[in-house]
């Protein structure tokens, strides 16, 4: 199956509240490792925490959807104060469908954000749009090393 992402970005923080409004997005399902933090990292960069806080303050819903183990994702979700689906079985759409049904997200306004093709395939199979974030070139794992902590609003 050849699936193309609906959006390609270099950094998850490019999806600021203005971007969400322009693209009719009110819900983001976020992959964790390699997307919003480096693989095997213990914490988050301040700029990612500020980005998530800014989205939530504008009413954008955030849910983690990860293939990682329950214990790990539960801890991260608690830190970010967001719901989550662990062991999501991507590229299957099972985890995404569970999130969509459990929290009543609208497929027309929801995107799956990830750094791998399995995230794109899972989104496609679940009937939602996908955002492929290319974080592989980046040292911080969030695709935004060149963005200063206070500069997130400037992107829009």
Image (cartoon, rainbow, N blue to C red):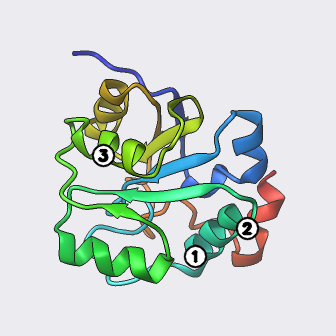
Q: What is the crowding at mark 3: few (fewer than 14 residues within 10 Å), some, or many (at least 20)?
A: some
Task: Tell me, for residue 130, which label it has, or none.
Answer: none
The picture places residue 107, in percent across and down from the top left corner, at 50, 32
Dot 3 or dot 1: first in sequence order is: 1
Question: In what element is the residue under mark 1?
Answer: helix
Question: In what element is the residue under mark 3?
Answer: helix
Residue occupying image coordinates x 36% and y 63%: 84
Which residue bears the numbered disc 2? 57
Q: Please identify the residue farthest to the top as the structure is shown.
A: 1
Quick one: 63 or 100, which is closer to the camera? Answer: 100
Q: Viewer-nearest of labels 2 and 1?
A: 2
Picture layout, residue 7 above or below residue 104: above
Picture layout, residue 24 above or below residue 74: above
The picture places residue 20, in percent across and down from the top left corner, at 70, 43
Quick one: 121 or 26, which is closer to the camera? Answer: 26
Residue 97 located left or right of residue 139: left
Residue 92 located left or right of residue 43: left
Q: CA distance from mark 2 to mark 3?
A: 25 Å
Task: Tell me, for residue 49, which label it has, or none.
Answer: 1
Image quadrant where residue 96 sits: top left
Picture layout, residue 134 above or below residue 109: below
Which residue bears the numbered disc 3? 98
Q: Viewer-nearest of labels 3 and 1?
A: 3
Residue 89 located left or right of residue 95: left
Residue occupying image coordinates x 73% and y 67%: 57
Image quadrant where residue 43 sits: bottom left
Dot 2 or dot 1: first in sequence order is: 1
Residue occupying image coordinates x 52% and y 78%: 45
Dot 2 or dot 3: first in sequence order is: 2
Q: What is the crowding at mark 1: few (fewer than 14 residues within 10 Å), some, or many (at least 20)?
A: some
């Amino acid at each position: 199956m050849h699936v193309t992402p609906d959006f390609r970005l270099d950094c998850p923080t490019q999806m600021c509240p203005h971007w969400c409004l322009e693209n009719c997005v009110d819900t983001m399902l976020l992959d964790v490792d390699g997307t919003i933090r480096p693989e095997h990292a213990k914490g988050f960069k301040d700029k990612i925490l500020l980005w998530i806080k800014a989205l939530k303050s504008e009413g954008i819903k955030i849910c983690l959807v990860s293939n990682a183990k329950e214990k790990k994702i539960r801890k991260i979700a608690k830190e970010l104060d967001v719901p989550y689906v662990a062991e999501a079985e991507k590229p299957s759409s099972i985890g995404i469908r569970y999130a969509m049904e459990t929290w009543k997200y609208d497929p027309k306004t929801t995107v799956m954000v990830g750094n791998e093709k399995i995230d794109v395939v899972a989104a496609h199979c679940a009937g939602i749009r996908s955002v492929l974030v290319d974080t592989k070139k980046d040292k911080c794992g969030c695709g935004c090393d060149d963005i200063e902590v206070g500069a997130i609003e400037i992107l829009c």
